[in-house]
Image (cartoon, rainbow, N blue to C red):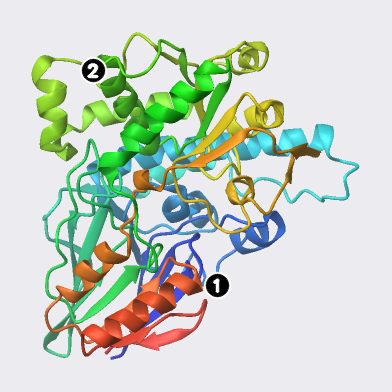
Amino acid sequence: MDIKLISHGAAREVTGTCHELRMGDTSILLDCGMFQGRRSEAAAKNAGFLFDAKTGIDAMVLSHAHMDHSGRIPLLYKKGYEGAIFCTYATQDLTEVMLQDSGYIQEKDEDFHRRHLEKSMLPSTGPLYTQQDATECMKLFVGKNYHERFQVVPGVYCSFMEAGHILGSAMMLLEIEKDGKTVRIGFSGDVGRSTLPIIRDPESMPPVDYLICESTYGDREHDSILTAREKLRDVIIKTAARGGKVLIPAFSLERTQEIVYDLHVLWDAKEIPAVPIIIDSPLASKVTGIFQKHPECYDQDMFDRFLRKAHNPFQFSLVTYTETPEESKELNGARGPMIIMAGSGMCEAGRIRHHLKNELADPRNTVLAVGYMAENTLGRRIIDPQYTDVKIFDQVIRKKAEIHYINAYSGHADKNDLDKLIQAVPGLKGLFLVHGEERGMFALAERTAAAMKVHVEMPERGKEYILA
């Protein structure tokens, strides 16, 4: 019996993670994420699967709750999938609110399209799924603890390890019993970084025969996380001095909580002025509540700095969490200085697009990017200096606001972290690089091949690769 890997997404690109392990007549899905990027291309990829959702997949294991890893689960369910979806307990709770929000945004975007863009020659394909679909698919989820060995399907066992990427994120060890032997396969999911605030550092990958590993920053180093707070402080002070607004597009999951955490530390130290901090994301409010339910995922600094003192790290005097659309709209006419943080992180959906449309052309303001912006997203065009204008909804906006990018906040391992993770795996026979743009993938592949005797593949979407 051959074991085959088929990448259905995040194959030589960053978004849409979805990998299939096929063992004879049995198939397991690793993640089921949403594609992001050029709207037409992403929509075409998101609309369907390269496998039969009803009969082609027996079980699924989910690494974490980010939309590019979980975002198409309701569509999978809608198309007939009825198997179990295994993940950590924190991921289960987070995925529920993330998918609900995704269904809501898709319904609202469809409504906006019908009302405002029906003459724009952009045909509507309707939402991929609704809030109801997102609610119903949650009955398939099965929560597991870190380091708990469980059966995925007969003959296949899985254990979760801390990935250090977001709350509940996991690397996984899959043990496949084959012909009287056991083949060990590792899947990195998204690997985090050491010293990030709030959550624990990534664990090491145990010995595996084959490793499916992300490569997002395979060719780049991050600035030290120790400098991120200082840069955040400097941007706020400079923008506040000219009466401007700091717009921070941030993923509602993890990045928003990290920034609020650092703002809290800066305010306690009296290093930033007393400007209103608006978290304009109902999803962020829900996610923050889930963070408070899962202290088992916190690192020691979180306990020492806040929890031992019974302080809430995500709430202090400057912070307001909005809920209603009316509260969000009121920010458009509000005078600065202020800080507005809203989703989505790549500016492809959510309330941040409305704020950018209203504020990007004002030179008093600053757009502060704090996370990865995939190719062909609005966020990438905003931080890329070669673009002087960007199109938001149906309007072309001149970029006059100051643009900053703090890459130290990245929740992804950089080239050094990835080298350390991969090269520490003893007896590795095969490495499959996924979740990366080709430049980073090839750089990581070359360094790995030079450092250790291992076969490296960079899967193409839909192509079969034999592991054993």
- Helix, strand or loop under label 1: loop
Residue under the point 27% across and 31% down:
291
Q: Amino acid at mark 1?
A: Leu
Q: Nearer the viewer, residue 361 or 285?
A: 361
Residue 84, compared with residue 335, is above or below; it is below
Badge 2: residue crowd in 10 Å (few <14, some 14–19, many ≥20):
few
Residue under the point 14% across and 63% down:
204
Badge 1: residue crowd in 10 Å (few <14, some 14–19, many ≥20):
few
Residue 166, given in percent of the width and then of the height, sits at 30, 45
| The N terminus lies in quadrant | bottom left
Q: Quadrant of residue 92?
A: top left
Q: Quadrant of residue 364?
A: top right
Q: Is residue 281 visible?
A: no
Kindly indicate whether the residue at mark 1 contacts the one at mark 2 (C-beta within 8 angstroms). Answer: no
Residue under the point 64% across and 34% down:
353
Q: Is residue 100 left or right of residue 29?
A: right
Residue 406, given in percent of the width and then of the height, sits at 42, 43
Q: Amino acid at mark 2?
A: Asn
Q: CA distance from mark 2 to mark 1?
A: 45 Å
Residue 437, given in percent of the width and then of the height, sits at 49, 68
Which numbered disc, 2 or 1, marks the residue closer to the eye? Answer: 2
- Helix, strand or loop under label 2: loop
Give the number of the disc on residue 403: none
Residue under the point 71% across and 30% down:
361
Number of labels in the image equals: 2
Q: Is residue 115 left or right of residue 450?
A: right
Q: Earlier in the sequence, mark 2 or mark 1?
A: 1
Looking at the image, the residue that sits furthest to the right is 119
Give the number of the disc on residue 50: 1
Q: Is residue 390 left or right of residue 325?
A: right
Q: Is residue 19 left or right of residue 198?
A: right
